Image (spheres, coloured by chain):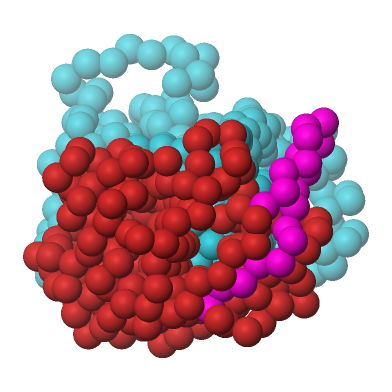
Chain colours: A cyan, B red
Amino acid sequence: MNTLILSWKNLADRLLSSLLSLLLLALGVGIISLLLLLNHEVERQFKTNLRGVDLVVGAKGSPLQVILSAIYHIDSPTGNIPLEEAEKLMRHPLIKQAIPLSYGDNYRGYRILGTTLAYLELYKGTIAQGTPWNATLEVVLGAKVAQKTGLSIGDSFAGTHGLLAEGMTHEESKYIVTGILQPNGTVLDQLILTSTESVWAVHEHEEDHEESTSEESHSDAEHENEEADHDDGHKTHPQENHEEDADEHYADREVTSLLVKFRNKAVGIVTMPRQINANTSMQAAVPAIELNRLFNQLGIGTSVLRGVAIAVMLIAALSMFISLYTSLDQRRYELALMRTLGASPEKLASLILTEAMLLSLTGLIVGLFLGHGAIFLLSQQAEAQYAYQLLAFQVLPEEALLAVGVIGLGIVAGLIPALRAANTPISQTLSNQV
Amino acid sequence: MSIATHEIAYQYPGRPKIMFPDLECNSRETLLVLGTSGRGKTTLLHLIAGLIPLQQGEVHIGGYSLKKLKGQTLDQFRGANVGLIFQQPHFIRSLTVAENLLLAQQLAGNSPSKKRVQTLLGRLGIGEYANRLPRFLSVGEQQRASIARALVNQPSVILADEPTSSLDDQNAHKVATLLAEQAQLEDAALLIVTHDQRLVNLFPQHLRLS
């Protein structure tokens, strides 16, 4: 019958009040651990996918939206930029590399991205089966896309217009799968990659179709505004004959955005964004700045939640204190009895402190389980919705700090009751004078 | 001499000083200390048990002078050499009867012995309740369990404070005889302070506080 077992039995004997303290503590710990993990995972996801991209160039609009869509593929693009302007920029002496991205369609919610093979290199994508795309309408599937859609090499499919899974399909121009990528934990996993020309080809065809059925009658201005998820700027020149050669250069060709790396980052970051924003119809967004802004904005929400969690934990400590303190009234005979049986005052103090520590440790463990469990559930949802994976079962260094804090709270909550227990007046208690 | 007191007196703040007559009690003997309420019966018992510090006089337990024991040494000494029985039986409510006895062994610095505990509970006729929580026992059974606990460390002295006053006639008689029998079996000196007239006829040695 050591102190630990006795403490445990005493806690179990006051089941309800022990449970209340425990749950409050677990709730506080759970929320904080959830926030820590979420913060850590979101930053990790954002950082792994940044890949040294110094600048993203897209259509005018929210710079954050440009970043989110072009790098993380979670928001709609702001629109398209003329290929002519993009190519001028790509030849700029300060720019080491600029990878064009073109959006237009999706297949069952997975985005079909027109780009160059440099994009694969940027994310260190390796082909698991088959070959990279070569001709127009050939695609390479991200590992997750292949797994979820069940498409394999040689299969063909029709893309759905826009970025939402429900919509008009391009039945006339079917894509054909030539390769499948190895899973590598980056955005590649959730993308269908093809050449920029494929995206153009599909939409030229599409346009002919639309023209013949006269379904749309947009003015140019309307196009500009609604192109958030439609790569349909090319409709402004319906007279052209598109079906002959998709690779041919047209002055009105467009891409959605450019991922830019500078030769000299320091100089590039200072001069280029201003130059682009002032002199072109394009918009330059610096990922580092936009992400900091995003994290700061998220930070307001998390700091409120963190404050709530800390308040809950303090209330838990208070409830623990009250529970222990009032239990001393009920247990005053017990404590006096233990003294008569040979227990020293220190022994009684350590008994009460052990009860506080046991409660806080159990609260800590339950809370950590809650936090990590919640991340696990969230991860499954995030995977289904955004194809992002969150690691639920890892221990962060901040959590060690949290553990120390919780144990400290336990000691503080138990200290006064422990001192009171140690000072139990034996004789007066036993002769009912107290 | 297992218990011997010499000219002890005690004064609570703002109250007249209580002078206690000297008393002696050998092992295997029972001494009944009688007195009506307010005569300081419990005070005397607590002084002998070392639960309140001596102001005056001297108490010897099994040859040791209580005055010379302090702090943790006194706690340990009391745990090992003095068995206490109270008017109301008190237990650790979260522990079973047997666990309460095992804890008493440990707190006195002895190694816990389940065998000893079970034997004692058997001898007091409550062996079958060993694994129950004390609060589910009747008052008579609880008082027997507290006798078992007082005996578990084979103390040289057993001090009982009104052990029968909360019991009916039948139980009071049974508990008192059991207590004396068991104290004798364990070679302990038994001191009972009481105002319970039912016990007067059971024990020949009396000391009256006046």
Residue B79 as seen in the image, left or right of residue B120: right
Query: What is the x, y in percent for residue A129?
Result: 23, 81
Is A366 one of the magenta-colored residues?
Answer: no
Q: Quadrant of the N terminus of chain A?
A: bottom left
Task: Relative to A336, say whether A250 is above or below.
Answer: above
Task: Relative to A313, say whether A147 is above or below.
Answer: below
At x 48% / y 77%, what residue is drawn? B26
Query: What is the x, y in percent for residue A395?
Result: 51, 68
Decide which of B60, A199 is in the foreground and name it.
Answer: B60
Task: Relative to B14, say whether A219 is above or below.
Answer: above
Decide which of A408, A347 is in the foreground and name it.
Answer: A347
At x 78% / y 41%, what residue is drawn? B17
Quarter of the rendering containing residue B99: bottom left
Query: What is the x, y in percent for residue B10?
Result: 75, 49
At x 65% / y 75%, what residue is drawn? B60
Q: Can residue B21 be seen at all in this image of the molecule? A: yes
Is B12 one of the magenta-colored residues?
Answer: yes
Residue A98 as seen in the image, left or right of residue A203: right
At x 39% / y 31%, what residue is drawn? A230
Query: What is the x, y in percent for residue A186?
Result: 45, 65
Decide which of A386, A179 is in the foreground and name it.
Answer: A386
Residue B82 as seen in the image, left or right of residue B23: left
Residue A410 as seen in the image, left or right of residue B138: right
Quarter of the rendering containing residue A48: bottom right
Q: Can residue A30 be seen at all in this image of the molecule? A: no
Q: Quadrant of the C terminus of chain A?
A: top right
Circle count:
0
Give, as a single range, the part of the protein colored magenta. Answer: B2-20
Quarter of the rendering containing residue A317: top right
